[in-house]
Amino acid sequence: MPGPIRTVLKVDLKKAAAEQPHLHNRWHPDIPFCGTVKNGEVVKIECVDWTGGQIGNNDSADDMKNVDLTKIHYLSGPLEIETAEPGDVLIVEIQDVQPFQDHPWGFTGVFDKKNGGGFLDEIYPNAAKAIWDFEGIFCSSRHIPHVRFAGLIHPGILGCAPSAEVLAEWNRREGELISANTMDRVVAQPPQPMNAHAGSAEDSIKEKVGKEGARTIPGRPEHGGNCDIKNLSRGSKVYLPVHVKGAKFSVGDLHFSQGDGEISFCGAIEMAGIITLKFSVMKNGMADLGIKSPIFHQGPVEPQFGPGRYLTFEGFSVDEHGKQHYMDATVAYRQTTLRVIEYLRRFGYDDYQVYLLLSCAPVQGHIAGIVDIPNACTTLGLPMDIFDFDISPTGPAKQLDMGACAFTSK
Amino acid sequence: MPGPIRTVLKVDLKKAAAEQPHLHNRWHPDIPFCGTVKNGEVVKIECVDWTGGQIGNNDSADDMKNVDLTKIHYLSGPLEIETAEPGDVLIVEIQDVQPFQDHPWGFTGVFDKKNGGGFLDEIYPNAAKAIWDFEGIFCSSRHIPHVRFAGLIHPGILGCAPSAEVLAEWNRREGELISANTMDRVVAQPPQPMNAHAGSAEDSIKEKVGKEGARTIPGRPEHGGNCDIKNLSRGSKVYLPVHVKGAKFSVGDLHFSQGDGEISFCGAIEMAGIITLKFSVMKNGMADLGIKSPIFHQGPVEPQFGPGRYLTFEGFSVDEHGKQHYMDATVAYRQTTLRVIEYLRRFGYDDYQVYLLLSCAPVQGHIAGIVDIPNACTTLGLPMDIFDFDISPTGPAKQLDMGACAFTSK
Amino acid sequence: MPGPIRTVLKVDLKKAAAEQPHLHNRWHPDIPFCGTVKNGEVVKIECVDWTGGQIGNNDSADDMKNVDLTKIHYLSGPLEIETAEPGDVLIVEIQDVQPFQDHPWGFTGVFDKKNGGGFLDEIYPNAAKAIWDFEGIFCSSRHIPHVRFAGLIHPGILGCAPSAEVLAEWNRREGELISANTMDRVVAQPPQPMNAHAGSAEDSIKEKVGKEGARTIPGRPEHGGNCDIKNLSRGSKVYLPVHVKGAKFSVGDLHFSQGDGEISFCGAIEMAGIITLKFSVMKNGMADLGIKSPIFHQGPVEPQFGPGRYLTFEGFSVDEHGKQHYMDATVAYRQTTLRVIEYLRRFGYDDYQVYLLLSCAPVQGHIAGIVDIPNACTTLGLPMDIFDFDISPTGPAKQLDMGACAFTSK
Amino acid sequence: MPGPIRTVLKVDLKKAAAEQPHLHNRWHPDIPFCGTVKNGEVVKIECVDWTGGQIGNNDSADDMKNVDLTKIHYLSGPLEIETAEPGDVLIVEIQDVQPFQDHPWGFTGVFDKKNGGGFLDEIYPNAAKAIWDFEGIFCSSRHIPHVRFAGLIHPGILGCAPSAEVLAEWNRREGELISANTMDRVVAQPPQPMNAHAGSAEDSIKEKVGKEGARTIPGRPEHGGNCDIKNLSRGSKVYLPVHVKGAKFSVGDLHFSQGDGEISFCGAIEMAGIITLKFSVMKNGMADLGIKSPIFHQGPVEPQFGPGRYLTFEGFSVDEHGKQHYMDATVAYRQTTLRVIEYLRRFGYDDYQVYLLLSCAPVQGHIAGIVDIPNACTTLGLPMDIFDFDISPTGPAKQLDMGACAFTSK
């Protein structure tokens, strides 16, 4: 008879993440295992929030502005999954995700354009923040009044370690992008020894991980990683390529909720918490399934709104300066989000409040048309039922007292 | 007591579209009205298919290869909506869309890379075709066996005419893109007098429309147009900006079904048919609602699959040559579609069959992460229940006899 | 290549139903076939409304009060399904249901307690009526203002003819109920020669059908019949027991919409129209599937409201006189409907308007608890989005001008 | 800033329920408050399972057979809700329900016909049991193999205490039923001093509660109580009539899942656990809302299956002996459940396994037709995706090894 589920990995929220040997913040095949899980086993894994505790439950965005981005994405792991070998697929069922009982809150942030930025940083360059309080399945924020919704709780990051070959490929191709960059912005993060955390690795390994280890910001096709897919929620089952013996599975960056795109970058409702996972190994799965990247089934319990309860906005690849871009879905999605900001500000919201809200509420971002040259068209579906007033398009808006989100001190 | 709904505009499928005065194939404010609708009225509008009948119900893709792209997108209209004026919003409720009773079929095509192309034309440069037969709400194709699904029936195109100013802006910005083009492909279509159809316009207007009229291929932010949004289905309500007196509303390019992205360009299940619309004018709606582009509510009857009945594929902005692109959702979505092709070909499908299928089946294309530099991540949800065999990821695939889609003759 | 779908059976709405040889209004194995359908074929079947045209599109319920209940339920058929034999299962896919184009309206009625009655006739004994106008997938009624919804269109009746043995059993058991009846109401309808319509049967058969033929009011376990299941809508697939050679399939009593229970008896939105069906025979299906009664899969396109958009009422088996009934789900459901009437009358509706509305709107009637002696508990979920004002439980109701449904003349 | 949510009431699973002063097992206005909650407050409440721990995690149904039904339904409470007074409505939002972390299992039972019985006890008179193990949101049972599903977690019982007048009415009407009973079965439970638990009441009150207190088995219209509504799950909001000052709210009988009807009586997946509730008082709510019984909104996160993923069975009010009942939805629902048992036994399940499964899996029990004399028709929708093999009606069934549920020892 099964007893309580084993917690394979604990974290200490009062201790610096960098000092906890079961955490790490780089992808590298040499980071040592911090635990072992049987094929078929269900375990609980504790996780810190993605900033490793840098953000406080308060009303200032100073911490957001000054966040140290070399100290983020502390992942729980890597775990050894028994019997897993390169070429296998690791099937991970997300049986539950919960915030810590005594830590019932999370945060959504906009980074300063000079330190992290975000999807709309050309227009909204300042730091901002919203704190969210959890009430069971629901959350609300004193910084974005008149909004409340059920969480679409999920891990932002999960994946298996790259092999040395896969890692080398990542560094090659991202290095090329960095080398070729002519934009006035950071386009990718190269390996960075400073504040690299290699778990319980001894010094020589630690140094190697610092020099070679892939940063955790981007998701990557070979393993998933920071894919930030809002629908990988409770009950989902994800099929992950295995590149090293024992899989070296890591997970972290738990989100109480997120919108498609996670547009403000620190955009989900970031939280510390506990994830319950079941691991199964499909031998030779990569070849048998013909997969190069993860695939998944969604779980059955994500919050449901009727289709008629979304208000959907259209956006096209013509930017805010009137410039026509060629089939650029990224530009189109940016325009789509701007359309929502324009719409919601009529009710009294500050633009930054909407920017934060679109990042974390369960908004649906679709690629509608991607072939009608020169315009890509994307849509964003906003669930009307997350507001406690009527946002439907019936005429001029009545302004409400919307308070303010947290901004930086002067 | 209301009687049968008035048909405001009829088409003749046996006659060339170019000869029918209630059709047109350019956006221009001077194309004359071809009918009048009261504010609040419900009417039926007949539409030809978007190629104006160039594609036949047969087993050769020669017609697809040789399609004349100057003779497409014949729209029904423009209709005068009483009381509508610039600055208003035209609310259009899509009360029904039906194929013609005696024309119960449609088609999905891949264009030749040299004549139209598509989202994956670098990889799949040849023309191909699938014919779909309609059985009530369902459709199936002799060219893509073992698949059957309920239509998500909708118009690919609807919108109000641009004002002269809006039209000039379109021509300016798209002209700049064309001028700056260094790619080995057509990036946008400038005005084209050849085969321009200006409805019942007299010769001088016809000439003007040919010279200035905007092509119908792209959707555009100011009015919607060819937005190709699969969810604008039965029961949807769309809010359209009005730019000219009387609105000059046009509609066409009916689709029995479409997937997000409509990736093969001629990608929906294209059909001729009848659309039932209710028109209402919201005075001063653009300012009151704060909208620059259309917004909409979906209807309540789109086909439902449970969330767990989708198999979802992830894709990232690293292209098939291993090149890292910066936050490019278009590249990511292309990769996502390639992942599905790789997966489904294991069951015996030809790649072109899957390319056609992903274009027209109700697949869900989401922007998952758009901020994790340098990788955009998109997902594509494939409903498993459209197949009559089990496509779930359980191991090696068993090949079935999948026949073939229509290809060109030698 | 398939052409337009064959219409196997036409009706003439201008002619008395009793005079049309492709209709009948009794269940009997000897009613002659009126057409033949191949195994695997898709056909269209035209149907009259269930009263055979007795109800008019007007503002008086006199026709409802005086309806002749011996002249109802004219069914289209029986059709011979090739290869079907007793013991087989006839699989019927409902591919579409549509009202006639030139007949875009339907009706919902309350019968007089003395002529038909209904679920609440002890409390609401008078006749009443609402006419519904169809606009594409939607309907609304001048008799029940501020309500509009998408139809859940379906046939009230479909089934195969009973064998002589099955028919004898029906007559035996219903005869026993009638014999034992001590209530002051009709409990079942015995065979009735008056106005029996046996299709194209010759006189001797006609007489036999009149004497023995089962009335069409009740659904029956052996074949389904008038099961009035609102979810047998577009896209559903139903598995019907076959009792006679050729199946002798009949269909009729089309509904534009219905609520669970169809409480006012003439409670759906009754209409004439066309149903598109696909027939397939499963040999030896009754034994192979182990079924005694029909089973079905719902279609994928029924109107969706989010779960949070229903307001749900509870009812228990304590009647309105304070009498405790033992585990009586019928009493409980009656109480549940009364709770909704009490709730909605606060907004200005007349009780009869709500009675009509609950009969035909897509309300969800569930058996919640059926074991907690002595109280059965049932629930009724009312979709809030069918109203154009807010019915949510926020405090005292504001009355609107609700006009009136049609009543009888003095 | 809110901290962790207050736990207003704890239970001790190792101690007899009868000895815990914060529990009670009768409805009576004089049971003393055991805690106070502010209007608007969110609290956690711990609950024992409904048998107070009589059932063990083992493979024998002896405990089920010998269960002491005077020692059940120990409810947590009653709680004083500040400001609540008779005539108000208490709004209770169910923010979460969770099993105890170290108690990740529950049970479903069939009682012996002579001690409790159930919906099908005429046919299945013996005791049986299934133990369910919880894995995050999912559950599975070693006693019913090849089945696994997400819980639809909810409280079976919640309500406010009756006033003395309401209590007297309950005793009057149920007493009349008991007096008039001529059936060979218990039809209702009168007050029973034996094992009455009146919380922390002093002896005189305790005696009074024993003599007068209403048993907890039935739900009742005036307050809800044991309504056993499966959809009162996470995120639901229920509106409860208040009959006494301070409301005296109680809750208990937590279910990990339940099917409509909870047919085996001990039919849900019964568990001990923690419920998180938010309480708000609507002054004068009963009159303002016009309610006599509870109403509710469902939460947004209940498990979703597509409509086409249910296999639905029909049942009619003709019993298994061929007797025709008049419009009896209870008989019809019993027949419907028997149809499912017949269908599923073909795959190798024992009838008792199916009886248990239908009690606790999220099956949808609808009242389809309640007016077609003499047959009531009900339906039961069985989600096919809870099985790990294909139960769709495609032909003869292949039997699997289904083991056995727990039965009694000889």
Image (cartoon, coloured by chain):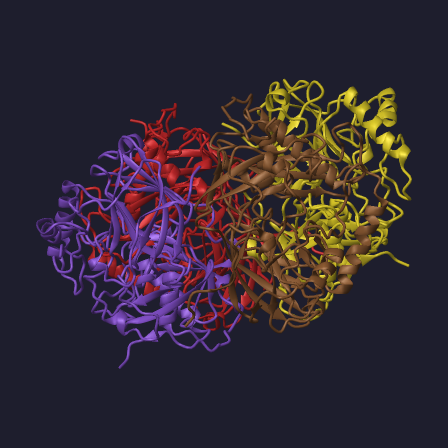
Chain colours: A brown, B yellow, C red, D purple
Which one is in front, D313 or B267? B267
Q: Is residue D142 left or right of residue A107?
A: left
Q: Is residue C77 left or right of residue B275?
A: left
- Residue at 36%, 53% (x, y): give it: D274
Image height check: is C23 above or below A283? above
Quadrant in the rendering for residue C395? top left
Residue A73: image location, x then y, percent: 63, 50
Residue B305: image location, x then y, percent: 56, 53
Which one is in front, D175 or A2? A2
Residue D365 seen in render: no
Residue C387: image location, x then y, percent: 44, 33
Q: Residue furthest left?
A: D204
Image height check: is A184 above or below C372? above
Q: Is residue A19 left or right of residue A142?
A: right
Q: How many marks?
A: 0
Q: Residue furthest front?
A: A203
Q: Is residue B91 left or right of residue A187?
A: left
Residue A149 seen in render: yes
Quadrant in the rendering for residue D394? bottom right
Which one is in front, C233 or D291? D291
Image height check: is A61 above or below D356? above
Residue D361: image location, x then y, percent: 41, 61
For the C terminus of chain B, the quadrant is: bottom right
